Image: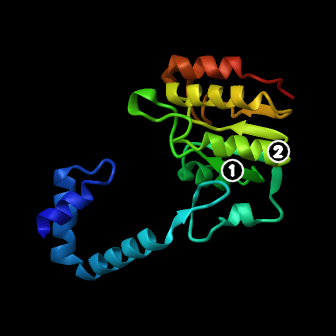
Amino acid sequence: MIESLNKAFCALPGVGNKTAQRFVYHLLERNREGGMSLAKALVDVMEHVKHCTSCRTLSEKTLCHICASEVRDASQLCVVETPTNIHAIEQSGVYKGKYFVLSGYLSPIDGIGASELGLDELEQKLTNQNIKEIILATNATVEGEVTAHYIASMAKQFDIQITRIAHGIPIGGELEYTDINTIAHALLGRKKYD
């Protein structure tokens, strides 16, 4: 039983055998109540959290709270790779539109194509809804850029403005410690200073 729990913790990203072993022994020796609470929470989440039928994020309801909101701007659609990206954008408090979650990025080597990312669903959304702008918010990786390019190409057949989130130097960042690709993106994506 201990070994199976150890293997279960290893299913988490970044958790190796030693870290999993520490988790298991900590729960068994010092926090059995916490372990029982963790087990119950995991079962509850696994049984009740599904994908939103509109944006594909994780939700306890058929429609997540963002898709169900009447005050969100349904003409803007921000395309992100993961539900955690939505959380990060929402924390900024700036974006007031809706989302579409890919749950990954195009990667033919890994067998992840357009259908695995739900791009057919995205195309139906563009066809059937009054979307005026797609904001491509995929990560600034090779795969993220390829995915953004694919979506932009697909969306060009519709009369929709296609934008890409800016990538560049973070606030508090110093140029001498910034990689050359980030500096190149920052220079290419520069805008007028008011």
Query: Is 108 left or right of 165, judged from the image as shown?
Result: left
Does 127 appear above or below 162?
below
Spatial separation of the CA atoms under disc 1 and disc 2: 11 Å
Q: Which of 47 and 86 is in front in this view?
A: 47
Residue located at (68% from left, 66% from top): 65
The x, y position of residue 26, in whole percent, is 20, 69
Query: Is 125 left or right of 174, judged from the image as shown?
Result: right
* On-image quarter of the C terminus: top right
Query: Is 75 left or right of 60, judged from the image as shown?
Result: right
Instruction: Give the quarter of the image for residue 190.
Output: top right
Residue located at (61% from left, 71% from top): 61
Evaluate if marks 1 and 2 touch, with contact meaning CB atoms under 8 Å apart.
no
The x, y position of residue 71, in whole percent, is 83, 63
Does 169 appear above or below 15?
above
Q: Report the disc number at residue 99.
A: 1
Is residue 114 visible to the viewer in this orientation of the structure? yes
Instruction: Give the quarter of the image for residue 187.
Output: top right
Residue located at (75% from left, 38% from top): 134
Q: Which of 143 and 141 is in front in this view?
A: 143
The x, y position of residue 129, in whole percent, is 82, 49
Crowd tier of the residue under label 2, counting other residues whose Cα lies within 10 Å: few below 14, some 14–19, many 20 or above: some
For the view shown, which residue lies furthest in the bottom direction? Answer: 33
Three-letter residue code for mark 1: Tyr
The residue singled out by tag 2 in the image is 131
Residue located at (71% from left, 40% from top): 123
Front tag of 1 and 2: 2
Secondary structure category for the residue under label 2: loop
Crowd tier of the residue under label 1, counting other residues whose Cα lies within 10 Å: few below 14, some 14–19, many 20 or above: many
Q: Nearer the viewer, residue 170 or 22?
A: 22
